[in-house]
Image (cartoon, rainbow, N blue to C red):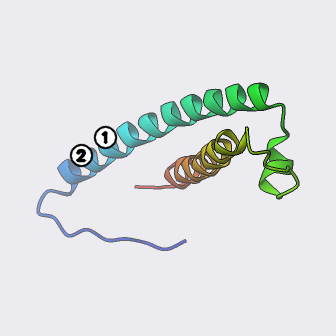
């Protein structure tokens, strides 16, 4: 694990500000994860596809579903990215 140093004349005030900012960002990310999971579930139910198979390229993009499948792929990628960000924040130690 690497360390990041911040030089400040008031370390306790800076620490508090940083901790609060991280907590707010973590909360927003977790809300975004929930919202994105709900959207993924809606699309999966609507399209009747397996998300794993879709991401593996095993789902044929029929013309009438192409845009919806692309949207689902985007939502799945967004969900992965959001989860990674939450995990990164969960491992921060100040």
Between residue 47 and residue 63, name the one nearer to us.
63
Q: Helix or strand or loop: what does disc 1 sit on?
A: helix
Residue found farthest to the front: 63
Q: Quadrant of the C terminus?
A: bottom left
Q: Is residue 8 above or below residue 72?
A: below
Residue shown at the point (57%, 48%) measured from the top left: 78
The spot of residue 15 in percent (x, y) is 27, 51
Residue 61's place in the image compared with 24, above or below, is below
Q: Is residue 30 above or below residue 19?
A: above
How far across and down, in percent of the image, does residue 29 sit? 47, 40
Residue lying at 66% horizontally and 39% vertically, measured from the top left: 68
| In this rendering, position of residue 25 left or right of residue 52 | left
Residue 59: where, in percent of width, then height?
A: 85, 49
Please report the residue visible at 42 percent of the width from the left and 35 percent of the height from the top: 28
Residue found at the very far bottom of the displayed protein: 2
Kindly indicate whether the residue at mark 1 contacts the one at mark 2 (C-beta within 8 angstroms): yes
Instruction: State how many labels appear.
Output: 2
Is 62 on the left or on the right of 19, as rendered?
right
Mark linked to residue 11: none
| Residue depicted at 67% across the width and 34% down the height | 40
Q: Nearer the viewer, residue 31 or 41?
A: 41
Q: Residues within 10 Å of mark 2 (few under 14, many from 20)?
A: few
Q: What residue is disc 2 on?
A: 17
Point out residue 90 in the picture as x, y percentages from the top left corner.
54, 48
Q: Tell me the SS state at disc 2.
A: helix
Q: Which residue is mark 1?
A: 20
Please tell me which residue lies in front, 63 or 19: 63
């Amino acid at each position: 694990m690497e360390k990041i140093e911040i030089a400040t004349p008031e370390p306790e005030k800076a620490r508090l500000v940083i901790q609060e900012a991280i907590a707010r960002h973590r909360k927003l990310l977790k809300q975004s994860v929930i919202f994105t999971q709900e959207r993924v579930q809606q699309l999966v139910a609507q399209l009747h596809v397996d998300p794993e198979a879709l991401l593996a390229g095993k789902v044929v993009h029929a013309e009438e579903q192409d845009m919806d499948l692309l949207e689902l792929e985007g939502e799945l990628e967004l969900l992965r990215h959001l989860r990674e960000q939450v995990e990164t924040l969960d491992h921060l130690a100040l």
